[in-house]
Amino acid sequence: MVPRSTGRGRLGAVLLTLVALLALAVPASAEPPGAPAAGASAAERCAALVGSTVRVEGDRAVVDTAAVVPAAAGEPEHCDATGRIGGIRFQMQFPTSGWNQKYFQTGCGGFCGAIPIDSCGEALSRGYAVAAEDSGHQGQSDGSWAYGDRRAEIDWGYRSPHVVSVAAKQYVQQFYGQAPAYSYFQGCSTGGRQALSEAQRYPEDFDGIVAGAPALYQNYLAPLSQGHLETVNRNPDGTVILPGTKAPVVAAAALDRCDALDGDVDGVIADPENCDFDPGTLQCPGDVDQPTCLTSAQIDVVRAFYAPPVDDRGRQLYPGGLVVGSEAGWPGWSIGTDTSLSGGGNFAESVLRYLAFPRDPGPGYSLFDFDPTRDAAKLRSMAKIYNADEVRMHRFERAGGKLLVWHGWADPLITPEGTIHYVEEAVAANGGRAATEDWMRLFLLPGVYHCAGGPGEDTVDWLTAIERWVEHGEAPDQVTASKLADGEVVSTRVVPEHVVG
């Protein structure tokens, strides 16, 4: 068991003519500075946002810039505005015509540090008012922005998406004269964690939430899973045991063993849970290292990658290892080089230096200074800030929220086993499958890496799926995933819901 940290109104089918009246319940300024007169043009309404302030939970949001952007590249003409709430910077885009009376917000990835407004392009093209934020700091390379700064840690941990949603919806009210009828949030990785955090901590913020490949056990994930994958693959002198060049060898053997399990030989392991691939079949003759086989030490690393990490006493530290079918994605994500850590290893080391402990050890701390047997318990305190693992979701259910959770079955950075574990516990804690299927569903995309990529079909119209569920009561039993090449669909796969409980 993984240690757990502690931690809308729903307009639904209400007639849109009532929206303006209900918007009075939104904690906005009575008359924001520069509010345009009735009948003002879109350009005037956009310009009036500049300098406008709204109160957000004891803080203040202010718009710094706003200008009308002409239609281009499939996006409509819109008012593009930037603002800030303390150290949190955000960007909003409001269609100047054809607004669908809805609001969309996206999450960010990794340590964030930049505003991913481009991820809102599809929603904007559909007529949504959209917003994104940088989680409270600038710069994405490492976690040094959090060094000794608890406010920055809290903003990144859970606060920034919430306060931006509260502020942005007030600006929607100011620009259009009414609040959005429906609000949606979608994110992947850190953004997936933000999505779950919104459902758990602020269940009134969004009607529909899509959480992709969520880093939900954040303060355990980095040191105990991603860090484990790095350290278990190192010799005492720091050199790599299983080099990235051997990952394709393992991938080909696993594929040969399990590709046909679903009756379709297509280069994708669609059913990794029932794959019985044994890396021991790749043993090099005489244990002499060769390009097309594995030494016994390399086989041990592969087995350790597949297994849940444990400490020196055999206690499981994280729910599951990497799954069979993810091997081709290991280089870079989970396998480094003799001179550099993998992406997961680098992230884990930065978390340990600047975020994982109540007192940050700083840049002198190494990933290899962390001893899971001795230090795992020290992660619990800050997990209360970063983790989105609260399973009691009754407030979200009562608010009428809908939650789509998805993960790539071949994710080489954040194992889907953690997401499956969380959903299993959430289903159990909220009354079982019959009690949760009306508001929470899980999908696993075969052959898909972290958020995108991999041999599988990695593109799903999650926004339409969550819209239909929220607005029309059409719960998704399956989704259609597509593989694109040069913007064209080259293959599709129907992915059924992964039912647990």
Image (cartoon, rainbow, N blue to C red):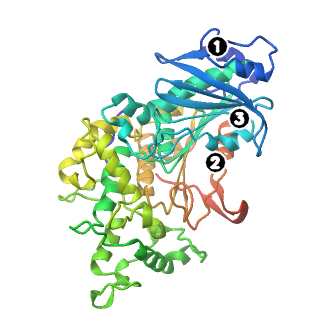
Cβ atoms at labels 3 and 2 below 8 Å apart: no
Q: Which mark is residue 128?
A: 3
Q: Residue at x 71, y 35 (%)?
A: 128
In the image, residue 203 above or below residue 413: above
Residue 321 position (above or below residue 184): below
Residue type at numbered disc 2: Trp
The residue wearing badge 1 is 24
Q: Based on the displayed image, in which of its 4 quarters is residue 20 positioned?
A: top right
Q: Residue at x 60, y 15 (%)?
A: 25
Please give left or right for residue 305 compared with residue 33 in the image.
left
Task: Judge the density around disc 2: few (<14), some (14-19), many (≥20) Cα neighbours within 10 Å.
Answer: many
- Tell me which amino acid carries mark 3: Tyr
Q: Earlier in the sequence, mark 2 or mark 1?
A: 1
Rounded to the nearest angstrom, the CA distance separating label 3 from label 2 is: 15 Å
Q: Amino acid type of disc 1? A: Leu
In primary-sequence order, the first of circles 3 and 2 is 3
Residue 159: x and y in percent read: 45, 30
Residue 212 sits above or below residue 286 on the image: above
Badge nearest the viewer, 3 or 1: 3
Residue depicted at x 63% and y 43%: 118
Q: Secondary structure at mark 1?
A: helix
Residue drawn at the location 66% of the way across and 17% of the way down = 22
Residue most extreme to the bottom: 285
Which residue position holds label 2? 462
Chain-order first, disc 3 or disc 1:
1
Q: Secondary structure at mark 3?
A: loop
